[in-house]
Each structure stands twice: as structure tokens, then as C-alpha cells.
Image (tube, rainbow, N blue to C red):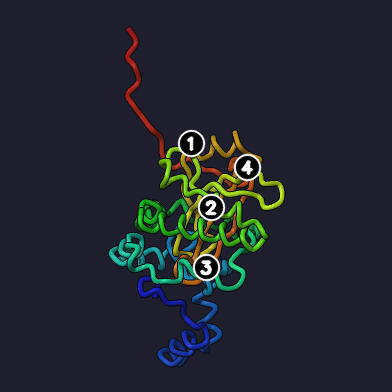
Amino acid sequence: MHIRGEVPRQTELFAAFAAEYPARTAKSIGNKIYNISACFAALDLPYLENLTPRFNFQRQLLVDVQRAASENVDLLDELARLPSRRLGTAQLEMTGDVVVDPPKLTASAETFMGRARVQRGPIDYIGREQANAALGLAGEEWVVAYERRRLAEAGRADLAKEVRHVSVMDGDGAGYDVRSFDPRSERERLIEVKTTRSGILTPFYLTRNEVEVSKAASESFSLYRVHCFGLRTRVYWLDGSLANTCDLAAMSFRALPKAQSA
């Protein structure tokens, strides 16, 4: 469904499974699908946002989902690398309120996801998706369009014209992707964009430069997390230093052999 750009209707999906497995009710099947979504989220793999993760399940299910994912690595890789022409048209649609609050995990869910990620999924889906230049660019363009609309609707068409796609126009070394403005104070807003086709609980990778820029310009810096992109696009943002707004975990290191002592 992700690859086809479809969002399933829960009632129809659960009823279809119930017809195939008559020993179980549509409600019990729905609960199990929510649990499977939680497993995918815990393994840093894509899940559909409207199949809300629920973390009340036995750990064996996580093992089973990990095994099934390992048998479908090619599909996961295809989804992570989808080119922009297959993202659908929804990425530039902004009907309704697209802004949501940042996710809040319960303590038990947060603990479980932390433990589950020790196992990891069969591929580094987040890394592959984030390396998808077409997806990243499309998400940035969506944010540029959103910021221009937001400023224009606030009566600041003059500022809307000044929104700049920094990563395209000036290069990607600034530590942020888009320069926008606060409509009242006219203060610059430096926006780093992270885009995923998966749900709101999907983590993202940051560079050292992005973290350092967010510290140095904490009063102006915002991270925009665009999720469910091209399906039912939504965004939340985190203002200020990423060291304060995110749980940061080192995933890789730049290394060279140590100098030999004389």
C-alpha cells in the first residue's frame, strides 16, 4: 500500500482479514494489526500512520515481524528508494490543518522501543530513505510552499516572497534547508527538514553540523518533521537546540587509525 501511495480504510481492511480468518473477529484482527505497526515502529521500519501502533503485545510478535521483514527486504528497499515521480501528487496538497503536535510516547512504549532497537530491522530503512535525494527534495519543496502559504495567510505576502530554499540555492552545508520568517516579529526562522513516508514515530538522522547550528542559533532554529508524505502529509516541528528537543543517540563515528607513538 505504501508503494502504491494508498492509505487503507481500517474497516474494510479488518473486514477483509476477518473474512479470510473467520475464527477471529474484525476487532481482534484490528488490535493485532495495531500491534504489528508497533513492532515496525520499534524496528525503525515503515508503518501506515492510520494503523496506530499499540505496544501491548508479547515479545514473540516482535521476533515474528522481524523475521517477516527479513523475508521482504527488497520491498522495504524499494519503498525507501521510491523516486519523486512515484510519490504521488499529495505531497504539495495542503488541505485542512497539516500541523500536528510532536509525538508523546508513554513510558512503557518508550522503554520497549528502546529495547527493541537493539535487535534492529533487517535493513537500515531510515538511512536508505533519508539518502533518497528525491524524497528529501520533495519534502523541502513542500515546506517552502507551506511557509509561503502560512505567511501569506498571516497577511505577510512581503515575507512570503522572501522564503528561501537554502539547501538548493546556496548549498547544503548551512545546517538547515529553508529560511522563513515569523509573521509578527519578522525574525528569521532557520528550518531543517526531515521527511518520511512512514508514520509520526519514525526516527530521523541528524548531522553534527545540524546539531551545532541548532545550538548556535537556538532562538531561530526549527526542525520540521514531515511524515506520511505523499499519503496524508503532516508535519510537526521542534523549536530550539536539537540537544534539548531530541533524544540523541550516536549511530556512527568518523574514524582514522591512531597516530603511532615514537
Few, some or many residues within 10 Å of mark 3 (<14, 14–19, 20+): few
Identified by mark 2, the residue type is Gly
Is residue 213 something that shows in the picture? yes
Identified by mark 1, the residue type is Asn
User: Nearer the N terminus, badge 1 or badge 3?
Assistant: 3
Label 4, on which residue?
Answer: 220
Report x, y in % for residue 47.
46, 68
153 and 114: which is toward the camera: 153
Identified by mark 4, the residue type is Ser
User: Nearer the N terminus, badge 4 or badge 2?
Assistant: 2
Label 2, on which residue?
Answer: 114
Report x, y in % for residue 136.
41, 55
Residue 91 is tagged as none
Report x, y in % for residue 97.
62, 69
Quick one: SS at disc 4? loop
- Disc 3 or disc 4, which is closer to the eye? 4
Residue 58 is tagged as 3
Quick one: SS at disc 1? helix
> Residue 172 vs residue 147: left or right?
left
Label 1, on which residue?
Answer: 209
Few, some or many residues within 10 Å of mark 1 (<14, 14–19, 20+): few
Q: CA distance from mark 1 to mark 2?
A: 25 Å
Q: CA distance from mark 4 to mark 2?
A: 30 Å
> Residue 85 vs residue 154: left or right?
left
